[in-house]
Amino acid sequence: MITIDKENGIFHLHNAQVSYVLQVVRDRYVLHRYWGRPLKTFRDSSPMQAIDRAFSPQPAAWPNERTFSLDVLPQEYPAYGHGDYRLPAYEVRLANGTTVTELFYDHYEITAGKPKLKGLPAVYAGEQEAETLHIYLKDSQGKLAVELLYTLLQDSAMLTRSARITNCGSEALDLTNAASFALDFADHDFDRLNLYGGHAAERSLERVPLMRGVQETGSRRGASSHQQSPFLALARKDAGETSGEVYGFSLIWSGEASFVTEVEQFGTTRVIGGINPFEFKWHLGAGEIFQTPEAMLVYSDKGLNGMSQVFHQTVREHIVRGKYQHELRPILVNNWEATYFDFDEEKIDNLAQSAADLGLELLVLDDGWFGKRNDDNSSLGDWFVNTDKLKQGLKGVSASAHKRGLKFGLWFEPEMISEDSELFRAHPDWTLHVPDYKNSFSRHQLVLDLSRPEVCNYVVKAVGDVLESAEIDYVKWDFNRHLSEAFSAALPAERQGETKTRFVLGLYDVLERLTAKFPQVLFESCSGGGGRFDAGMLYYMPQTWTSDNTDAICRLSIQSGTSLVFPPITMGAHVSVTPNHQVGRVTSLQTRTLCAFAGDFGYELDITRMSAAEKEQVKKHVALYKKLRPTLQLGKFYRLLTPFAGTKNETAWQFVSEDGKEVVVLYFKTLAEPATPIRKLQLTALDADAEYELTDYLPAQRTSHDFGGEKSLDMKGQVFYGDELMYNGLGVEKIDTDFAAYMWVLTKK
Ligand code: GLA
């Protein structure tokens, strides 16, 4: 709901979860006044105080009012150049060379629901589900206009923000920075949380004190990246997983994002998020508009889990679209770690037979089926089947899967091109490249220039033709290098700063067209694992391959970190072989399986070569997963313990079914320790007054020598009240083995 106090210029966006207040002062400036726990009404119990701050200039209209300066005002979309020395939300360069403009409040509008953002992925909501406040700002000299969009979802602590910038002047201008949002906190008593990493090591959580000066989290790689996720949170020092105040931000953008915090001289904090302004320049002709990507802003007074619940709910109900939004995802087998490039029709046929025998549901043929691709040196761009490997073409492998009751999926990497490809020989200028300079290669490949419509059209046609050529139920859409030499042969000099942004917009156009044309296909996005795990991609493709690292122990941190923003149903998670191909670790089949249960479950190893005993175990796991799948995929997810905090040696995740009846708890202990207390695992979000029966229990599987002596703590059949499970906790039996994994299933009586 949006309440307006016209006399005082106060706009109060509120519901039962959150309040967000902004105020227009002196008919000009849009200030940030409050964001946090819901307020009945905002009457300004802590009014702004007029203080004379030296070296903080006065705006031209109030030259003698030494207590009034933009330098100290909390602002919603600050400019630079009129005495606010903090970082601005936007920057322009006008035709005469100046970077100075000033935005004044003009008018507002409130609309039901949420407007679509042209060409961009965004939160969607019906007229009954949200309300949007539009604040219109105009430059005092009429050079530009900005519309700030604020949407509050009904009954959710989710607020979205974006900005639409129009050049209202008669000459072109350059937009060199266009944040999605900015806002100022009254203090800096926060920890700063971000998700950092690298290939095969995505999304570890870093929590450091918010520091004076500027701290930035961002990507300059042309993609949202493995290195720094488009996410930031500010948490009060006492905030943990289940209690305390947290402010979370995530950008719905698959290109370069940036989140900046600036703690300034008086100890207040400015936060700015949006497209990374580094090298960004959008040439805005007279009358042209630039729409920024959308940012999600979450307030939680229930710690990090509270924040994650709001993100998860939004991603599931207001970002992911299409057939698979609420549908259970199939259990797959992927041939990548099973065969790499070395496969033929017979091998894939055998894989399909084993998959069917084990109860799997989808066979995915990964890289290597097209052109003459037998390694990663060639053929990207040549999206036609290699009949040397697959004698009966895609129809043959697809039929081999389907006749065994499996769905069939296929790998693509459509944004890329190999120098050794027919496509490159026909269109060498279709790559991103800079005149006079040679291109850098990464995995021997170059990047197609998706800022060009004809290249996008080619991609839509090439992929579309393949999808029409055989029965294909699933697509894995990969992106295996970052951008370099980001220059487009099709853009004039003054528009080169748009190339990386236009690349992402081109990709979105391609994805919109393909997903609309093939609504029955389940798309999974991938970028060398989770290099583009962001809400933008999830708008088109409901799941993402979380990491190329399939080691269960590494995955505990990768999946825990990813879950800060994204729910398990968006995360591909596979059981692979041991020793693990990325880190060489040996873990039990049960540990690998339970870790992969916490995502879109599948197998990525040569299942044809498993021993009879392993196959029996896999059949049991698959049957168990099918039984628990509605809870694991569609239920609510909570982190109880993560490798980022506490002992750093334990991870525990809890799932509660939509109806609250089934609870699945997974617990992992990385290294065995000789002298530690017995773990009591305190559950969360249960009904304190309800009884829960322990209906299933998997103790850890020993991989090392069993010293004997310990008794199993199998309490199956016992019934506990929710309060005891939450406050006293579930006892974990001690086992002297590394990489132990346990599972409990509780059923509400
Ligand atoms: C990327 C993906 C892998 C696999 C390979 C194929 O690395 O993340 O899962 O598909 O490409 O080349």
Image (spheres, rainbow, N blue to C red):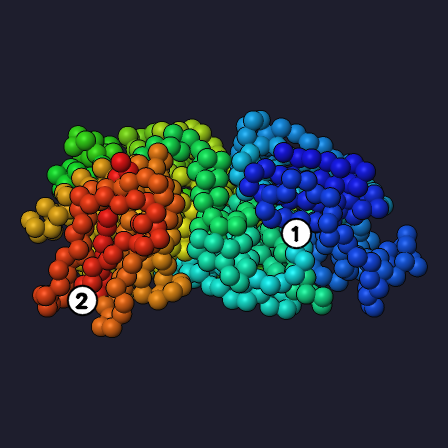
Q: Amino acid at mark 1?
A: Ala
Question: Can you give x and y, in whole percent of width and height, for residue 301 in the image?
Answer: 52, 50
Residue with the most extreme bottom position: 675
Q: Is residue 428 above or below residue 124?
A: below
At horizontal 10% and vertical 46% (from top left) the residue drawn is 616
Q: Which mark is residue 682?
A: none
- Which quadrant holds residue 462? top left
What is the secondary structure assignment of the residue under circle 1? Answer: strand
Q: Which residue is mark 2?
A: 736
Left or right, 142 with reference to 87:
right
Q: 189 and 384: which one is in front?
A: 189
In which quadrant is the C terminus drawn? top left
At horizontal 79% and vertical 57% (from top left) the residue drawn is 49
What is the secondary structure assignment of the residue under circle 2? Answer: loop
Q: Which residue is mark 1?
A: 182
In which quadrant is the N terminus drawn? top right
Question: Can you give x and y, in whole percent of width and height, for residue 647 in the image?
Answer: 35, 66
Left or right, 157 with reference to 163:
left
Q: Let me know if residue 167 appears in the view.
A: no
Q: Is residue 44 above or below residue 483?
A: above
Residue with the most extreme left position: 612
Left or right, 712 with reference to 500:
left
At horizontal 17% and vertical 43% (from top left) the residue drawn is 717
